[in-house]
Each structure stands twice: as C-alpha cells, then as structure tokens.
Image (cartoon, rainbow, N blue to C red):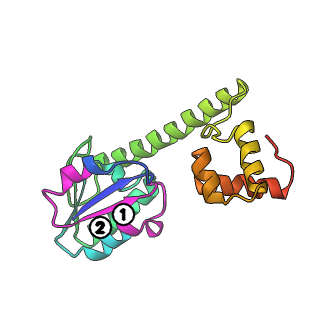
Amino acid sequence: MGLVRVSTVNQETRRQHDALDPICERVFEEKISGKLAVDARPALTAAIDYMRSGDMLTVQEVDRLGRNLLEGLIVLNDLFSRDIAVKVLEGIAAGEHTERSLILDLALALAEDRRRDIVRKTRNGLDAARLRGRTGGRPRVVDADKHRIIIARHLDGESIRTIATATKLSVGTVHAVIANAAAGPASD
C-alpha cells in the first residue's frame, strides 16, 4: 500500500504518485497537514485500517507519515506492532523497516524541525512586510471605481450575474460588494 500526502489542496501529488503507483497495489492520498493527529487524517486512518499483518506501507519520504514527531512515532509504533512494514523511497531513512530505529526517529525529528523552520520563516517574512506597510493576502480585485460601478448598476436594477459579466468579476465578488454596501459604509 502507498500513502501520498501534501499539506494543502493546491499542492500537486503527481510526483509522489509517479513513484508509488507502479509499485503499490493501492495508494491512499490526502491533502492535509502532516502535523495533525492520526485520527484527523482520513486517508492515513483508512490506509492503516485497510492494512493487515504482513503488508507494507510505502511513502516517498518519511515526512509523508507526518511532520510531527510524536504523531509519526505513534503511526510507526502502531504499524510495527501489527507486523506491518514501512518502506521509505527517499531521504535518510530510505529502505524497508520492520521496527523503529534511530534513523527513522531522526528522520521524523528532522521533518518536524523543517516544518517549524518553515513556519518561523513565514512568520518573520510577514512581520517584516508588515513593518514596511504591506499586508499579506491576494491583491484586491475591486478598486473604488469598480465598487461605484457595481453599486450604481445594482441600484439601476441590474442582476448580480449581469453586473459580474460586465465587470469581469465573479458573481460571489459582486454579491459581496453589494452585501457590504448594504451593511454600511465601506472600510478600505
């Protein structure tokens, strides 16, 4: 069996599937943070429940099991206690494992440390940008002119869909502008 994991729905899993699909009978995929507890990860839980003694769970890198040392160790202990092997294709823990080892524990600890480092660098970058007057997030698509146009067309009785088409905005964006205007003055 194989397990493919990425942290967000926007990330691609193709690279992991390319490695696992040819060698695994079945591949479970999840797009969820590896820092979460096992019971909060449906695909990992399904894979563990599906597997029987003598099976092997294959991952491309050990951090696909988790980026939280404790949770990763819980997964490994559960698998090994049920006589399920783990195969890691890449990284310092590459190979087949039937019991916990220092190298597996170290690889999980390094994965947690990398995750912590990414979070710290992201936070530092956002703080530095804030000090320069920048805030994160997507750029606004509705400037003051489009806002006025949307409200004027709405007051003229045009439908939200017609306004969206004319302004090249989504129906949801136009609806939000109208709803915010109805709720009170805009706060930009």
Instruction: Classify mark 1: residues with Cα within 10 Å, few (<14), some (14-19) or many (20+).
Output: some
Asked whether 135 or 7 is in front, the reply is 135
* Magenta residue check for 26: yes
SS at mark 2 in the image: helix
Quadrant where the N terminus lies?
A: bottom left
Q: Mark 1 touching mark 2, by CB under 8 A?
A: yes
Above or below residue 63? Residue 25 is below
Residue 9's image quarter? bottom left
Three-letter amino acid code at the position of disc 1:
Val
The structure residue drawn at horizontal position 74% and vertical position 59%, both measured from the top left corner, is 157
Q: How far is the residue under mark 1 from the one under mark 2? A: 6 Å
Please identify the residue farthest to the front as the structure is shown.
156
Q: Left of 25 or right of it: where is 146?
A: right
The structure residue drawn at horizontal position 29% and vertical position 67%, both measured from the top left corner, is 79
Give residue 79's mark: 2
Please identify the residue farthest to the top as the structure is shown.
132
Instruction: Classify mark 2: residues with Cα within 10 Å, few (<14), some (14-19) or many (20+).
Output: many
Give residue 7's mark: none
SS at mark 1 in the image: helix
Quadrant where the C terminus lies?
A: top right
* Magenta residue check for 145: no
Magenta-highlighted residues: 16-44
Three-letter amino acid code at the position of disc 2:
Leu
Q: Left of 13 or right of it: where is 167?
A: right
Give the residue pinned by disc 1.
75
